Image (cartoon, rainbow, N blue to C red):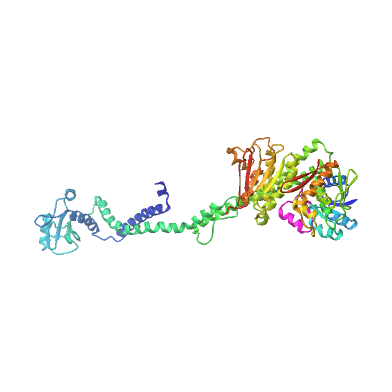
Amino acid sequence: MRRFTASLSVRLIVWFIVVQSGVSVLAMGLSLFLSRQPGDEYAFAQMRLNALVVGALDEGPDGQLTISDTPALRAFKAQRPEVGIAALRGSSVLPGSSPILAAALGDLGTPRFNSAGFVLTKGPLAGSTVVATSVPSRWGPIVVVGANNLLRVDDVPALLLYMSSYLVQVMGLVMLGAAIVTPFVIRRALRPLNEASLAAEQIDLRRRDLRLPEGKGVPFELAGLVAAINAALARLDEGVGRQQRFAAEVAHELRAPLAILAARIDSQPESETVLGMRRDLERMRTLVDQLLLIASLEAQDIILNEPLDLVALARDVVADCTPVALARRRTLAFGPELVRLEIQGSRRILYGALTNLVENAIRAEPSGGVVEVKVCDSGEILVIDQGKGVAPDDRERIFDPFWRRDDCHPGAGLGLTIVKEAAAAHGGCVSVEETLGGGATFRFRAFPTA
Amino acid sequence: MTRILLIEDEPEMAALVAANLAKSGLLVDRASSCQTARETLVAVRYALVLLDRRLGDGDGLTLMPTIRASQPGAPIILLTALDRLDDKVAGLDAGADDYLTKPFFNDELLARIRAALRRPGAEPAIAIACGRVTFHPQTREASVAEAPLVLNRRELLVLEALICRAGRVVQRDALLDAVYALDDEVQPKALDAHVSRLRKRLIDLEAGVVIHPVRNVGYMMTAS
């Protein structure tokens, strides 16, 4: 029901009927008032009488048409005793007519007429205004005659009802047409709005450049809304862009002081403290790199169509991570099931993502263990460690930004977010499962499934 | 002594980097702007130029033609905080030989300098040490604790390739390229034999270095 009343078509139809009916009644009343003539008050009163008399007509068993004594007619007679009522078929006065009026008509020679209005000048009804109207009935045209039937206030409702029956007949056709046409017109007129909502569904942080369709086809009533929404989107887009540039700029500006710090640490004689500072700086460097990677992933200013060999890239990552692994007394093993795997993507982003996975695995791997990096036949890259593994409940959440298993884990919790974003940017995905015998196995795909 | 020019406008950074490089036997001159760099470049001959891109009086890349003209054959390494891919491409397109993003440690910079100096046309490189092993690129002689290390040709090539990238993995393909000249018949299996013979020699001599195999990837030499 709620949906029904909320429909624009229903509202339009209802309003159309209400307004149109009101306007029609007013217009009819106004035209009657403007074209009024002397005697109209009798003519209008006659309309009610016509209805009463036709409603009271009845054919007796002998085939004689009479004005029977219906309750409505009786009530009218009781209310208006001065009114004379008669009905004629052809030139014969029907039984049930007022005897005085029938006599007066007889005095006139029982005239045959369709419609007439006149004043009697003699007889008991002398001075009475008489109105005769031909009315259709089941038995053919009947002439209803009323004398002294002056319009009174209590006739108005009946008169209106009578007039409205004509109104309903004419208006009914118009309204039926409106009811059929309106939903169709609305659907057509609102089609640009549907297109706009389809376009709006596509808009997210990755596709900030999209706007709702404007221009031809958009009705001007909607054009303002569409333009306003597009302007709002443009402002948001600009704001997000400014924020992304800000993040990139901050990360960038950190490089110069970090570079001085690195050089200063290098100028010190080797000691435990210096080693510790080197590690701290390494972490800051990683963080700056990660922030910049995230910024460029979000800003989409990465080139995703470099041709590259994923096997060679994975081999490079293993080679470059080996010094870190050996320093931590873990080893890396590379197991390619393919010789080459040509894809298109961003070398920088994929290298960063895989490095992240391998460095995580090195941290998770127990001392003396082997972290295995595998390129499967399917092209998926597996990074397998024998550490504590990831609890089933956490397997989705670990890819959320700033998620950390515990506070003593180094890093800002951005690494796996970058991995996920990097895979997504290439149409692929990353997931984690349990290594046979314990540990975590990350499954990374850098291309869409066929 | 190998003389290099460091063009960097941050005085503290320049002083520290120069001091750190000096410890490795390099003579480092400093220029703090495009203007002073131009003056220095025409006056002195350098083996290599370290160039910051963001200088007080302009983009370091505008110095490239001057460097190329005044220092023929001298490699150029860009040191910069700019790290977007197109910045790198722009730097390398402009004629830089290598690119190092700030922050960096002295070891990383030294490794890049060595690599750049080993390129054909570059000035003779500085001696490279790992553990108790020293390798002189210009004479292609190796020694363990001052005593000459005599190796056959292929083992020496393996040693050179590994020690030049000590602390980093040398991938098999790179090692094969280094050990087998173009006209040689490449024997992948034999490579492993050369490496294991070299490893055994170094252990016997207590050279203080370890050669780590990395399965399906390559080898890495570190000081033990």
**In x, y percent, where is residue B191?**
77, 51
Please say whether residue B47 is one of the residues in the magenta stretch: no
Q: Quadrant of the C terminus of chain B?
A: top right
**In x, y percent, where is residue A254?**
74, 45
Q: Residue at x 63, y 42 (%)?
A: A441
Give, as a single range, the part of the protein colored magenta: B79-103
Count all numbered tags in the image, as a single digit.
0
Nearest the eye: B51 or A219: B51
Nearest the eye: B1 or B56: B1
Q: Residue at x 72, y 50 (%)?
A: A316
**In x, y percent, where is residue B17?**
83, 46
Horizontal side, residue B108 vs residue B143: left or right = left
Horizontal side, residue A196 vs residue A368: left or right = left
Task: In the rendered view, tell whether residue A272 sits above or below residue A35.
Answer: above
View extreme (bottom): residue: A112
- Which quadrant of the view contains residue A330? top right
Horizontal side, residue A133 vs residue A169: left or right = left
Nearest the eye: B57 or A167: B57
Q: Can residue B59 be seen from the camera position used here? A: no
Task: In the rendered view, tell whether residue B206 sits above or below residue B76.
Answer: above
Horizontal side, residue A295 vs residue A132: left or right = right
Q: Can residue B153 be seen from the camera position used here? A: yes
View extreme (left): residue: A62
**In x, y percent, where is residue B148?**
90, 47
